[in-house]
Image: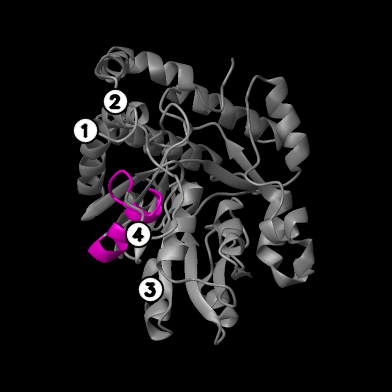
Amino acid sequence: MQVLFNDLAAQYQAIRAEADEAIQKVLQEGWFVGGAHVQNFEKSFAERCGALHAIGLGNATDGLFLALKVLGVKPGDEVITPAWSWISSAEVITLCGAQVVFADVEPDTFLISTKSIEQKITAKTKAVIVVHLYGKMADLKPIKALCDQHQLKLIEDCSQAHFAESAAGKVGTVGDCGVFSFYPTKNLGAFGDAGCLITNNETLALKVRRLANHGGLTKDEHLFEGVNSRLDSLQAAILQVKLNFVSSWTAIRKTLAEVYLDHLKSVPEIILPRIDEPAAHVFHLFVIRVQKREELQAYLGERGIQTLIHYPKAIPFEPAYTYLSHSENDFPVAAQLQHDVLSLPLHPFLSQKQIEYVCEAINSFYGGN
């Protein structure tokens, strides 16, 4: 049996009629940047997120950078971000001229540790970037309280957690702003690069929109120097179509995740992800910690099961950050995760039988039934 890690071709076939119609409409209208399709998606996405404003962007990395710039992060400032994440949440800090400060993460959620954040705050700290990783929301209540106490800006990187919700609120609406990726493999993905920033702050939204469009809202208006980061009409039209399916796709992800949790709970060599609030995890990825990872990955591969590692290296140990001279002792949890984490196949076009097949193979590898 073959179990693909992801299957975007199957996703396209499931929505082919609607997607093709949307694409043809854009092509026939001949309006490819901005316009009604972008405006309609921004409105729809903001409403789904429970936010007042949504600004379509070229990608999520741009969104994080723009958020920092608009929130006033400048050279000499420090910004705290998790040591365990994709590099975007760190590199944008440096691109603003500020100093990236890494915080360790929790061993069973992989999310930034409030205690570690508190230990890293100095007089130079200006903001915190929280990453909702693998589909699970970070513990925002204590983090928000800490930011309020120290008058820090809070940016939520929601790139892997579309429409998650916890007791703290809807993802992306608790901090000053939330940034989303619509990279094709995300729970809500475009047919290329795309991103979005949401906020309930009208002034912030207006500044981001201007900064992303060469400093102005209309053609030939440049109130200040900006950048070029815009969601194009084709991607907006496709995302508008997918908005009608993402809830059902997320429900399937959660159902399949429950199969994993049930069938792997008795394997002592595995640490399963911790689930506190069901709505707070939308399972962009199903990531476990395992013993003998490389051997297990090879064993599964021989049986047609695709797996990936998110991530092979913690960000502080990437070559880009050797100048910070960090050691593994600085981030013991993130350092250990490098050797443990394994992402299992999970997407809406897998069957329960395929997930059970993966679980049987894992149990067999570790000598179970």
Task: Return the mark for residue 36.
Answer: 1
Measure the alpha-carbon separation of dots 3 and 2: 41 Å
Please, what is the three-letter code of the amino acid marked with disc 1? Ala
Neighbours of disc 2 within 10 Å: few (<14), some (14-19), many (20+): some
Neighbours of disc 3 within 10 Å: few (<14), some (14-19), many (20+): many
Q: Which residues are magenta?
A: 200-220
262 sits to left or right of 304: left
Please, what is the three-letter code of the amino acid marked with disc 4? Leu
Residue beneath disc 3: 144
253 versus 83 height, above or below:
above
Residue beneath disc 2: 31
Residue beneath disc 4: 223
Percent coordinates x, y for residue 68 in the rendering: 46, 64
Please, what is the three-letter code of the amino acid marked with disc 2? Trp
Indicate the quadrant containing the N terminus: top left, top right, bottom left or bottom right: top right
Within the magenta stretch, is there residue 209?
yes
